[in-house]
């Protein structure tokens, strides 16, 4: 992998991680046509996710700090037997809803190899189908009546539904932000709150994905040079921060429908090309790699 390739993947990751178009799907397509799929491609994808994690902390640092402080107050109330469900403030309720939303992630631990198999299968049919699923979710969310629920009115069932969407998102082509925000909107969440809840709940998911890879990295090592990793992480962090700001504008302007059309078209093209590649022995991949090398 070269530095320009790392730079391109960082831009793709940073923009598509938060825009509702699936970063994993776009990275998988790029890695397929450039011959970068496989274990090194999967590891580099984890590094890029670390970059976008930094972007979330930068964009929502105030809310995250408030939740951390409230979490310790919550623990103190539990230890001193002062905790009462009916007296919870919105920040405390948001903490509990975030905890509920993370419960479905337990299944991801057991499905880790299943999800990773699509990143190393040298095919793009699954990516195409999943991108079309993302498009359908975005279309349904765009046609949902605007909700008014915030942390104060959110229910455990709402958080659990959003958590299920996040647990399915490791499939390449399923947008984590797109699916979780869409489900949140369909559950009646207020739009800006749905965005912040989606991005903040993604922090433990990304951290968990990184930690799950640590034993493999320590055992097998990695062949990617440090400069390439740094270029990917920094680029994904910068463009990720810009994408977060863009998503807030998109949600306010009811513009998710355009991403629905985009993911449906790209998904259909990817699935069609993937089927042709399977039948032709990866002819297009070989052609693209020939042009690049």
Image (cartoon, grey):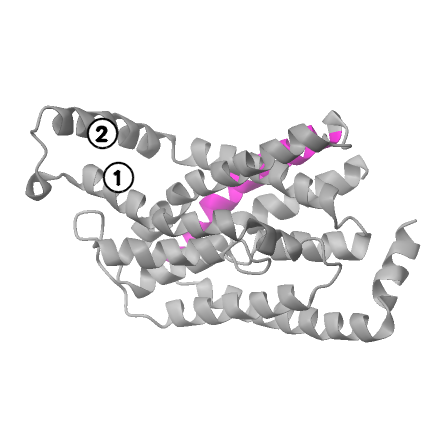
Mark with earlier residue (2, 1): 2
Q: Main secondary structure of the magenta part?
A: helix
Give percent across and percent down for residue 75: 20, 27
Q: Residues within 10 Å of mark 1 (few under 14, many from 20)?
A: some
Image quarter where the N terminus lies is top right
- The answer to which image quadrant residue 30 occupies is bottom right
65 within the magenta span? no
Q: Which residue does the numbered mark 1 point to in the structure image? A: 95
Residue in view at x 8 percent, y 38 percent: 84
Q: Is residue 152 above or below residue 79?
A: below
Q: Is residue 270 visible?
A: yes
Instruction: Give the x, y percent position of residue 128.
Output: 63, 68
Label 2 crowd bin: few (<14), some (14–19), many (20+), radius 10 Å? some
Question: Considering depth in this image, is 59 or 13 the residue closer to the camera?
Answer: 13
Q: Which residues are magenta?
A: 228-253
Q: Secondary structure at mark 1?
A: helix
Which label belongs to residue 209? none
Q: Residue at x 57, y 51 (%)?
A: 16
* Tag shown at residue 70: 2
- Residue 250 appears in the picture as rendered: no
Total numbered circles? 2
Give the answer, above or below, for where 8 lies relative to 76: below
Numbered disc 2: secondary structure: helix
* Tag 2 and tag 1, C-beta contact below 8 Å: yes
Q: CA distance from mark 2 to mark 1?
A: 8 Å
Q: Residue at x 60, y 32 (%)?
A: 215
């Amino acid at each position: 992998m070269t530095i320009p390739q790392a730079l391109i993947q960082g831009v793709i990751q940073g923009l598509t991680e938060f825009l509702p178009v699936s970063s994993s799907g776009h990275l998988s397509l790029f890695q397929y046509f450039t011959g970068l799929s496989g274990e090194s491609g999967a590891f580099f994808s984890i590094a890029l996710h670390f970059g976008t994690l930094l972007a979330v902390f930068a964009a929502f640092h105030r809310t995250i700090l408030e939740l951390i402080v409230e979490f310790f107050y919550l623990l103190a109330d539990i230890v001193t037997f002062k905790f009462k469900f009916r007296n919870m403030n919105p920040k405390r309720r948001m903490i509990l809803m975030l905890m509920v939303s993370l419960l479905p992630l337990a299944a991801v631990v057991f499905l880790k190899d299943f999800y990773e198999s699509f990143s190393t299968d040298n095919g793009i049919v699954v990516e195409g189908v999943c991108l079309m699923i993302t498009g359908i979710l975005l279309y349904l969310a765009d046609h949902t009546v605007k909700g008014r629920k915030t942390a104060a009115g959110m229910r455990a069932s709402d958080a659990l539904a959003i958590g299920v969407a996040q647990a399915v998102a490791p499939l390449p082509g399923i947008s984590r932000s797109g699916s979780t925000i869409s489900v949140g909107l369909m559950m009646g969440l207020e739009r800006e709150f749905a965005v912040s809840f989606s991005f903040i709940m993604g922090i433990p998911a990304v951290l968990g994905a990184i930690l799950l890879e640590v034993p493999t990295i320590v055992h097998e090592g990695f062949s990617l040079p440090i400069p390439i990793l740094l270029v990917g992480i920094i680029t994904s962090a910068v463009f990720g921060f810009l994408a977060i700001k863009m998503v807030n504008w998109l949600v306010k302007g009811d513009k998710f429908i355009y991403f629905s059309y985009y993911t449906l078209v790209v998904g259909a093209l990817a699935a069609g090309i993937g089927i042709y590649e399977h039948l032709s022995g990866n002819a297009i991949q070989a052609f693209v790699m020939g042009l690049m090398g």
